[in-house]
């Protein structure tokens, strides 16, 4: 495919619009998957970030590309529900670590079978090789935008 100078801005627009649509589609799918476990997408997202390693709120925000304030609000709700807990952070006294509790791990585990089914269906629909290449391309696009803008996803 030959890219002309006049079509380059259209590529950025197409990438952005496709990403916005894809984000909405993933949020809809995630809502469907998370609801039976009693989670919202945002609660699943924050819990998912700390399933294996506790992280400070700022670290979760960076990883997820959402604001620290949003993560703090959601983490507080997860702690209230007993799905997460705050732990001391040896690296920073005031920035406590968020960690999943056994109840939080169980809630996420309830999603796993439906998640695996959705993943298999998408792989069958696209072809697993194309699915892998799409994920790789999305990662490269994200990395390129990060280099270009200097934005590591840490939203204030």
Image: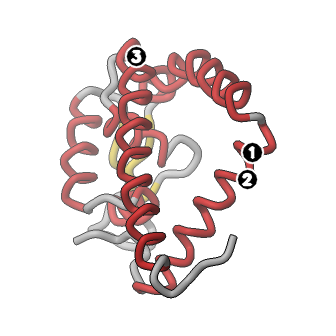
- Mark identifier at residue 17: none
For disc 3, the marked residue is 37
Q: Secondary structure at mark 3?
A: helix
Q: CA distance from mark 3 to mark 2?
A: 31 Å
Pick out the residue farthest to the right: 129
Residue 85, horizontal then vertical, whole percent = 35, 41
Q: Nearer the viewer, residue 121 or 105?
A: 121
Residue toward you, 140 or 111: 140
Mark 2 neighbour class, 10 Å CA radius: few under 14, some 14 to 19, many 20 or more: few
Left or right of 114? Residue 133 is: right
The extreme top residue here reads 36
What residue did someone put label 2 on?
133
Q: What is the x, y in percent for residue 44?
A: 40, 34
Task: Assess disc 1: are there few (<14), some (14-19) or many (≥20) residues with their C-alpha within 10 Å of its C-alpha.
Answer: few
Q: Position of residue 127 (x, y in %)?
A: 76, 34
Q: Residue at x 39, y 62 (%)?
A: 16
Q: Disc 1 versus disc 2: distance between alpha carbons? A: 5 Å
- Viewport quadrant of the C terminus: bottom left
Q: Which residue is mark 1?
A: 130
């Amino acid at each position: 495919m030959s890219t002309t100078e006049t079509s380059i801005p259209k590529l950025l627009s197409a990438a952005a619009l496709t990403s916005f649509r894809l984000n909405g589609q993933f949020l809809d799918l995630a809502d469907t998957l998370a609801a039976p476990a009693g989670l919202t997408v945002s609660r699943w997202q924050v819990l998912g970030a700390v399933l294996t390693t506790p992280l400070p709120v700022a670290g979760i925000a960076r990883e997820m590309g959402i604001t620290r304030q949003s993560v703090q609000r959601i983490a507080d709700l997860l702690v209230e529900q007993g799905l997460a807990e705050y732990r001391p952070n040896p690296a920073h006294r005031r920035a406590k670590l968020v960690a999943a509790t056994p109840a939080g791990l169980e809630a996420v585990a309830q999603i796993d079978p439906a998640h695996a089914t959705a993943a298999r269906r998408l792989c069958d629909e696209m072809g697993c090789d194309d699915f892998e290449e799409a994920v790789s391309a999305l990662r490269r696009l994200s990395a390129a935008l990060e280099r270009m803008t200097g934005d590591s996803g840490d939203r204030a």
